Amino acid sequence: MPTTAPSARGLACVVALVLVPTLVGCGGEPGGDDAPGPSPAATAATASPEPGASPGARPAYAADEADRAAVDAMLAQRAQAVRVRDEAAFLATVDDRDPRLVAQQRTLFANLARLRLARYDYETTGDQLLPDPVRRAGPREPVVRFQTVEHTQVADALTGAVGNVVRMTYVRRDGRWLVGQEKAAEQVAGGEGHLRPWFGGPVDVADRGTLVVLTDAADAGLADALADIVEESVTADAALLQVAPDRQVLVDATGNGPTVRLNTVDEEEAAAIYTGVFDVDAQGRRTTLSGGTIRINPDLTAAELTGDPGLLRHEVVHLLLRRYTGVLPMWLSEGVAEYARWYPLTTRDLRVTPELWQRVQAAPHRLPGAGVFQLDPAVNYLVSQAAAQHLLARGGPVALRSLLEGYRSGVDAGAGVDDGDLTDRLLADVYDTTEAEVVDGAWDALGELDR
Ligand SMILES: [Zn+2]
């Protein structure tokens, strides 16, 4: 039996529906996503002195191949120290004259040491970027920043390494290259495929094998509570949709890293998203899909998270259906996720404000595609949920599976996910129905909303 949201919680859905899910990464990240990775070329700069960047008018330093080889050797030692959990060896790669840097690096090491890592290493290119200021560096000590990528594979939870362009500046002190500064990397478009919750504040980890949950250490007990909810959600959603349970995911509920934003007109933030994560090459371009993450908005409190299991049931549907990522129309992937989020509640049990009810009734009577979905997500999640509810009532999970497979075959054969001909053909083949009938069914269900 699935975890059920009591109807009292169902009555609170107006706010939750607006906040809930995900447009950007929510199942919309195919392995070969064309969202651009970080573009180091855009930030590349020579190491010429720049006012503000290097106080004290430090002369330009042009690193040579020997410098880069020495930095690479230092980074190899540093990565090895992470892998064998040797804090002293790790801190030996850090300029210890800056107490803030040392504290930050201790936390980074402690966070990484809490994870079982299948891989941890660094990669540099010869590209020299504008160095960040190194506090307390002497005027004759050269400072350099190479393009640097960190590859991290959390064992079992990820299928490969996640690549992060990191922003480390190196300083040569007494003939040795050290990490002189590390800053959070610039946010980039398409950055939702990246994952680096170990850089920032201290984290707590719940390690359930293939399911790994990270939270801020300050949220005592939350990591285990979320791991329980995810496990229960996987069981419930897999039973509801009659698909194989899949618990291989890294959940990032930390405040580290960029906030995920819904790309809506009103800038509403997503409560959570499921997204693929990727390795990158030395230039920061995405290479391979390395698994998936459920990323939770750090603005949600622990009580909000644990008090609303439906939030994770929605995201877990995207996890369970990830083989269909990128091949489903948005109304279908979001509709099924919303259906599971509220199950066994239906549209009949949900209450909306009169204003939202008006918007639902006035909305174009059609299945919302990606092009219009974010124009009014509150309405379109409801419409999608109602459409999924109609289809599941008509054919249950077996027919739904046929529909999903049909979209995959159709898209593999070259159709677009919002191709009306494909939808017409699949609805006819699988349900012996038409889009107009599904739309009518959806609006019948929406007419039952409590207002
Ligand atoms: Zn979603």
Image (cartoon, rainbow, N blue to C red):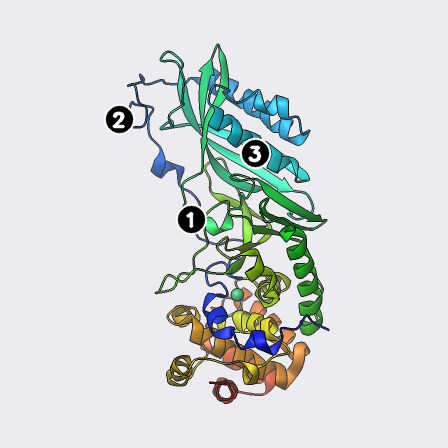
| Mark 1 neighbour density, 10 Å: few (under 14) some (14–19) many (20 or more) | few
Which corner quadrant of the image does residue 116 belong to? top right
Q: Nearer the viewer, residue 157 or 420?
A: 157
Q: Which residue is mark 1?
A: 36
- At which x and y percent is residue 434? 51, 86
Between label 2 and label 3, give the one nearer the viewer: 3
Q: Which residue is mark 3?
A: 107
Between label 1 and label 3, give the one nearer the viewer: 3
- Type of the residue with mark 1: Pro
Please give left or right for residue 142 compared with residue 52 in the image: right
Q: CA distance from mark 1 to mark 2?
A: 30 Å
Earlier sequence position, callout 2 versus callout 3: 2
Residue 309 seen in the current view: yes
- Type of the residue with mark 2: Pro
- At which x and y percent is residue 412? 55, 64
Earlier sequence position, callout 1 versus callout 3: 1
Residue at image position (40%, 37%) is: 40
- Type of the residue with mark 3: Thr
Relative height, residue 172 to residue 7 (above, below): above
Relative height, residue 408 to residue 128 (above, below): below
Which corner quadrant of the image does residue 433 belong to? bottom right
Q: Secondary structure at mark 1?
A: loop
Earlier sequence position, callout 1 versus callout 2: 1
Please give left or right for residue 156 compared with residue 75 in the image: right
Q: Which residue is mark 2?
A: 51
Q: CA distance from mark 1 to mark 3?
A: 30 Å
Q: Quadrant of the N terminus?
A: bottom right
Q: Which mark is residue 223?
A: none
- At which x and y percent is residue 259? 45, 51
Q: Secondary structure at mark 2?
A: loop
